[in-house]
Amino acid sequence: MVETVDVPERVVIAETRSTPADELPAWTGASLGRLEAAARECGGVAAAQFVVNHSEVSMENDGPTESCVPVLDEAAAREWAARRGRAWETAVRIEPARRLAYTRITKAQVAYPQILVAFEAVAQWMAGEGLEMAGPCREIYLADWDAAGAQDPVCDVAFPVRVGRGRTR
């Protein structure tokens, strides 16, 4: 099932790396762990952490991937990044408000290449609804990964969307 949700503008601390699909799980876990620890110095975590795929990530293509943790205190985040962010090439940015089309998947479905089925399902649903992609796709992590079982819902696979040209909604 695919649904839409409107998300507000958020301040995020982020790390970006070009990583092939087979190395992505290890890097993502380590990166989100570092960013979550940093968030404690930035007012705390404001919303679910997410990973943005800025281009295709596969065994052959190591498109840039960005780990993001929304934080509560922008000034503290910018100060933290200036002081400690260089070690991991961490940046602070504003994630704009947007509408997302998403489907929720289990921990077992997050594994590559199974996760591609979810991305394809959302893309097909968007086309059927007359929606266009309005930014890079993302994985939004909703649950404690280590505590979750294989069949527990842990991730929303999502695309930012807008109404397609010539369509009204």
Image (cartoon, rainbow, N blue to C red):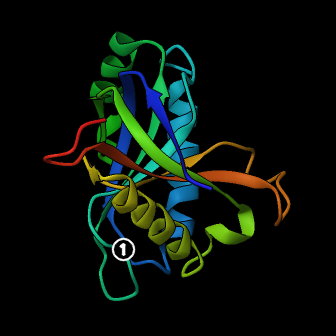
Q: Position of residue 50 (x, y in %)?
A: 49, 45
Please say if 39 is above or below 25: above
Left or right of 167 in this view: 18: right
Q: How many marks?
A: 1
**Front residue of 92 and 160:** 160
Q: Position of residue 136 (x, y in %)?
A: 30, 53
Q: Quadrant of residue 68?
A: top left
Q: Position of residue 54 (x, y in %)?
A: 27, 59
Q: Position of residue 163 (x, y in %)?
A: 26, 42
**Front residue of 122 and 130:** 130
In the rendered image, the quadrant that contains the N terminus is: bottom right
Please say if 85 is above or below 157: above
Left or right of 61 in this view: 76: right
Q: Secondary structure at mark 1?
A: loop
In the rendered image, the quadrant that contains the C terminus is: top left
Dot 1 alpha-carbon crowd within 10 angstroms: few under 14, some 14 to 19, many 20 or more? some
Q: Which residue is mark 1?
A: 57
Q: Amino acid at mark 1?
A: Val
**Front residue of 116 and 36:** 116
- Residue drawn at (54%, 82%), measured in percent from left and top? 113
- Residue drawn at (56%, 53%), measured in percent from left and top? 2
